[in-house]
Amino acid sequence: MGFLKESYEALKENIDLHSVTLVAVSKTKPVEDILLAYESGLRDFGENYVQELCEKHTSLPKDIRWHFIGHLQTNKVKYIAPFVYLIHGVDSEKVLLEINKQGKKLNKTINCLLQIHIAKEETKFGLNETELEIIIEKYFSQHSSHQLEYVKVCGFMGMASLSKDTEQIKNEFQWLRSLFNKYQQLQTSNFKPAHLSMGMSGDYLLALKMGSNMIRIGSLLFGERKNL
Ligand SMILES: *Cc1c(COP(=O)(O)O)cnc(C)c1O
């Protein structure tokens, strides 16, 4: 399938890449496709399987910024911690603590986004509002007693419902945007929300309208994926 250069050019026309980060989601795609995208200027790539990410990281240029966008299991954090640029899917206290632990071992601060559950589907991952409040209160508020010195929360990530109902999707993005705005007031040494990662091939225009500044685009850039 390769890399759809015309789609990329069209996308560049549509979005302001000075204010929006485009993460090219290369999951399931071969390194040859990623290299074509790289040669066109893309540097941010997203993967959702740890092993696949590690293999691609080994064989591709070292200035690629690798985004982990999948559901991260605690026991796999150690494999990506040394090189990952941003972990989008932090959805539990447990995984947050493990990221901090691995960061400490490497003496490196690891950038994270907290994943918020905004969709109707229960199968999707993410924190609900209460879980988010508890984590922020415990680890990231001015008076929190626990210090996570090797984690930096750089923002939030969410996935909208897979639906044709654009009002529904808009509301989901809007809600995440309002959470983001609310917590932007809170700036501590390890909590500095700057990225709002929402929007994929099918809904990125809506997401941008609702204030996203980081979109994760797969099929629009690389073609449809085979169902695994
Ligand atoms: C696969 C995936 C994407 C990209 O999906 P497309 O519809 O192909 O653009 C974005 N975000 C996450 C979390 C994904 O798993």
Image (cartoon, rainbow, N blue to C red):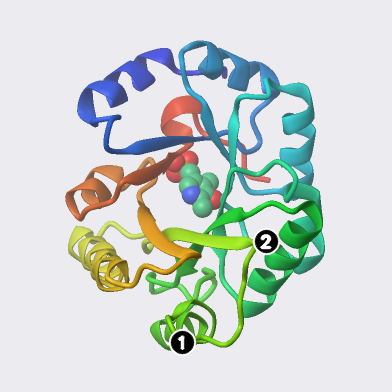
The residue under the point 52% across, 18% down is 37
Q: Residues within 10 Å of mark 1 (few under 14, many from 20)?
A: few
Residue at image mark 1:
143
Image coordinates for residue 144, horizontal then vertical, percent: 51, 86
Q: Position of residue 214 (x, y in %)?
A: 37, 45
Q: 216 or 16, which is in the foreground?
A: 16
Label 1 is placed on what type of residue?
His
Q: Is residue 141 visible?
A: yes
Q: Depth check: 216 or 224 in front?
A: 216
Q: Is 26 left, or right, of 61 in this rendering?
A: left
Alpha carbons under labels 2 and 1: distance apart? 28 Å
Between 133 and 12, the one lying in front of the other is: 133
> Is any atom of residue 159 visible in this view?
no
Vertical arrangement, residue 220 with respect to residue 123, above or below: above
Dot 2 corresponds to which residue? Answer: 72
Marks 2/1 in contact by CB < 8 Å: the verdict is no
Vertical placement of 127 versus 200: above or below?
Answer: below
> Where residue 66 is drawn, which disc sits there?
none
Horizontally, residue 213 falls left or right of residue 125, namely left
Name the quarter where the N terminus is drawn.
Answer: top right
Q: Earlier in the sequence, mark 2 or mark 1?
A: 2
At a point 30% along the width and 66% down the height, the residue shown is 184
Quarter assignment of residue 147: bottom right
